[in-house]
Image: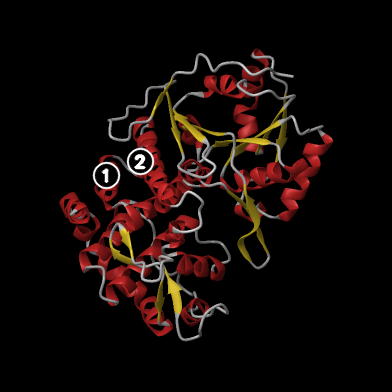
């Protein structure tokens, strides 16, 4: 058994979001997630050496590291040496880490492997990977023997900036996403941005798009920052400091969402901005459209709806196209050959509400959701949704075929931030 010891040799300091943050290798930021329960997130670049000290504040019999084959090949030997140096016995279990693997089959196989390897109520399980892996590993931890202690090590941009900042652990069923799960808080989160350097660049771009949602629904002051970062360097060529800084700012924006809804029962609904459109696009494309691209298209459509219902200004809508299509370089078109009628019909069906209308997250202005009924959603006539969908590609062509429109000045976005603050 490993005895509890006082945390030592961890170069950490409490987060001050108002202070300028520099990401010095080995320097660890430690802050709360604003959830309930509220685990601490340890964030930085090249901070892996601090992990054993964090673990050794607990008493446990064995450590189980759940990861994927790629991460195990890249970092497994380093992890074993790190833990062995502190006398920590570690078992590695690998599972698939794709969205298609976020299901009951993967969960059951993982639980079986962990039991065969001798996991006990006194063990600690660490999930080390992307969003799908963290969901499966966290749910397994919550189920085994009524719950074993769990820590998360996000290893992709999406995992760092979104997946690990929720206590919700869920897998997909045949009838939809996130249908089966539980709320289960980890002991702590450990986000080392060094692991992001080897991530697939296309996946990183998708994750950045989803992270931008936080600004549109809750904090428009981040929009100029996103523009400045992506203008200074291509999203494919962000250096380590810029990449860490971008991840950090998206994390902080999510912390503010969590602060408003620590139990994830209310304002977190705002993060469904654009999701009905995104889900329908992914379903009809058979998953060939990336999650971030689908979300970006969905947010553009939701912004058009917000404008047509008399809320967003045309400049605020255009901001969506500039960021996602111009600065981030995503293809915002509905794919050629996709059945527009089928897409519109899919959006208009929901057995939980009247057939004449559907509830969606819409914006009053960039940075603020409409909330007439207390659930951060509004009823929208399906015919209006259909019109937006049918005209979408023509609107994208008009917005983004003009090179000047791709790179509108940062001053326009700064103006939105000033208006939002007033």
Which-is-in-front pick, marks 2 and 1?
Answer: 2
Q: Secondary structure at mark 2?
A: helix
| Label whose residue precedes the other's in the sequence (2 or 1) | 1
Residue 209 coordinates in the image, percent (x, y): 40, 53
52 sits to left or right of 281: right
Residue 162 horizontal side relative to residue 22, left or right: right
Question: x%, y% of residue 4?
Answer: 64, 19
Which circle marks residue 249 in the picture?
Answer: 2
Which residue is outermost to the right? Answer: 116
Residue 90 x/y as whole percent: 71, 25
Quadrant of residue 365 within the rendered picture: bottom left
Q: Quadrant of the C terminus?
A: bottom left
* 19 in relation to 135, above or below: above
Category of crowding for the residue at label 2, using alpha-carbon neighbours closer than 10 angstroms: few (below 14), some (14–19), many (at least 20): some
Q: Are marks 2 and 1 in contact (CB under 8 Å)?
A: yes
User: On the image, numbered disc 1 is attached to which residue?
Assistant: 225
Give the number of the disc on residue 157.
none
Give me the residue at 37% from left, 69% from top.
Answer: 302
Q: Foreground: 373 or 20?
A: 373
Quarter in which the N terminus is drawn: top right
Instruction: Residue at 30% x, 40% y: name it.
Output: 233
Q: How far is the residue under mark 2 from the one under mark 1?
A: 9 Å
Q: How is the image coloured?
A: secondary structure
Above or below residue 342? Residue 408 is above
Residue 18 in the image, given as x and y percentages of width and height: 28, 34
């Amino acid at each position: 058994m490993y005895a509890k010891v006082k945390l030592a040799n961890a170069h950490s300091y409490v987060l001050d979001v108002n202070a300028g943050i520099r990401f010095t290798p080995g320097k660890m930021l430690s802050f709360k997630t604003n959830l309930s329960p509220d685990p601490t997130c340890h964030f930085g670049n090249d901070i892996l050496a601090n992990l054993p000290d964090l673990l050794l504040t607990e008493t446990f019999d064995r450590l189980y590291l759940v990861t994927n084959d790629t991460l195990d090949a890249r970092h497994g030997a380093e992890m074993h040496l790190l833990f062995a140096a502190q006398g920590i016995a570690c078992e590695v279990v690998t599972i698939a880490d794709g969205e298609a693997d976020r299901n009951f089959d993967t969960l059951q196989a993982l639980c079986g492997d962990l039991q065969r390897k001798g996991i006990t109520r006194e063990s600690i399980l660490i999930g080390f990977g992307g969003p799908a892996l963290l969901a499966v590993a966290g749910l397994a931890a919550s189920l085994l023997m009524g719950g074993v202690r769990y820590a998360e090590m996000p290893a992709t941009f999406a995992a760092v900036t979104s997946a690990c900042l929720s206590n919700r652990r869920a897998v997909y069923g045949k009838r939809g996403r996130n249908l089966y799960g539980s709320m289960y808080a980890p002991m702590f989160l450990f986000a080392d941005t060094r692991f992001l350097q080897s991530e697939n660049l296309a996946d990183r771009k998708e994750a950045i798009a989803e992270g931008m949602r936080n600004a549109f629904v809750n904090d428009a002051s981040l929009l100029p920052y996103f523009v400045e970062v992506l203008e200074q360097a291509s999203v494919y060529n962000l250096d380590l400091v810029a990449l860490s800084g971008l991840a950090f700012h998206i994390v902080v924006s999510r912390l503010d969402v969590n602060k408003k809804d620590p139990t994830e029962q209310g304002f977190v609904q705002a993060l469904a901005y654009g999701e009905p459109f995104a889900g329908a696009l992914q379903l009809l494309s058979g998953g060939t459209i990336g999650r971030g691209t689908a979300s970006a298209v969905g947010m553009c459509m939701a912004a058009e709806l917000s404008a047509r219902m008399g809320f967003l200004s045309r400049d605020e809508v255009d901001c969506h196209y500039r960021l996602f299509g111009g600065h981030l370089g995503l293809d915002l078109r509905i794919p050629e050959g996709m059945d527009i009628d089928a897409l519109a019909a899919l959006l208009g069906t929901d057995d939980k509400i009247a057939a004449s209308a559907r509830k969606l997250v819409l914006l009053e202005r960039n940075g603020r959701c409409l909330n007439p009924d207390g659930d951060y959603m509004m009823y929208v006539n399906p015919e209006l949704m259909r019109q937006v969908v049918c005209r979408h590609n023509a609107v994208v062509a008009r917005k983004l075929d003009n090179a000047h429109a791709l790179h509108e000045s940062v001053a326009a976005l700064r103006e939105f931030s000033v208006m939002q603050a007033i």
